[in-house]
Amino acid sequence: MCVLAWPCCSHPGLPRNAEGRGYPFEVALPDALETSGVVLADQVRCLDWRKRRAKHIEPAPSTVVGEVVGKVRALLE
């Protein structure tokens, strides 16, 4: 998973919110990243990166990726 930037969100297929609201499917991005906020793991979608003119900012840490995958898996079970 990489952190990307386009007009509406910052993860490929995973919306990002600038502020967490304590929702159970939020995954906080570490303070050390250039990108801030939370990943909304319950709002996975397929997006056309070219059409949205996405650009790579930085890779997401494996801890964040693991937590997002765990939350998505819980939704699918």
Image: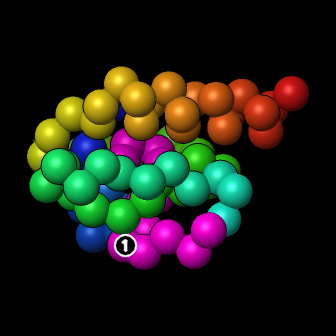
Q: Could you tell me residue 17's position as x and y percent? A: 43, 69
**Residue 16 belongs to magenta span:** yes
Residue drawn where x is 64% and y is 29% of the image: 70
64 w.r.t. 17: above or below = above
The residue closer to the viewer here, 17 or 23, is 23
Q: In this view, does 47 lie to the left or right of 58?
A: right
Q: Could you tell me residue 45's position as x and y percent? A: 56, 46
User: Does the image show residue 8?
Assistant: yes
Picture quarter containing residue 52?
A: bottom left
- Mark 1, other Cα within 10 Å: few <14 / some 14–19 / many ≥20: some
Tell me the chief SS of the magenta region. Answer: loop
Residue drawn where x is 21% and y is 33% of the image: 59
Q: In which quarter of the image is the N terminus?
A: top left
Q: Could you tell me residue 47's position as x and y percent? A: 44, 46
**Residue 54 belongs to magenta span:** no
Q: Give the range drawn in magenta.
A: 11-22
Q: Could you tell me residue 44's position as x and y percent? A: 58, 46
User: Does the image show residue 54?
Assistant: no
48 w.r.t. 31: above or below = above
Residue drawn where x is 77% and y is 33% of the image: 74
Q: What residue type is labelled 1?
A: Ala
Q: In which quarter of the image is the C terminus?
A: top right
Picture quarter containing residue 50?
A: top left
Picture quarter containing residue 71?
A: top right
The residue pinned by badge 1 equals 18
Residue drawn where x is 51% and y is 42% of the image: 46
Question: Exactly how many numbered labels are in the figure?
Answer: 1
Where disc 1 sits, the SS reads loop
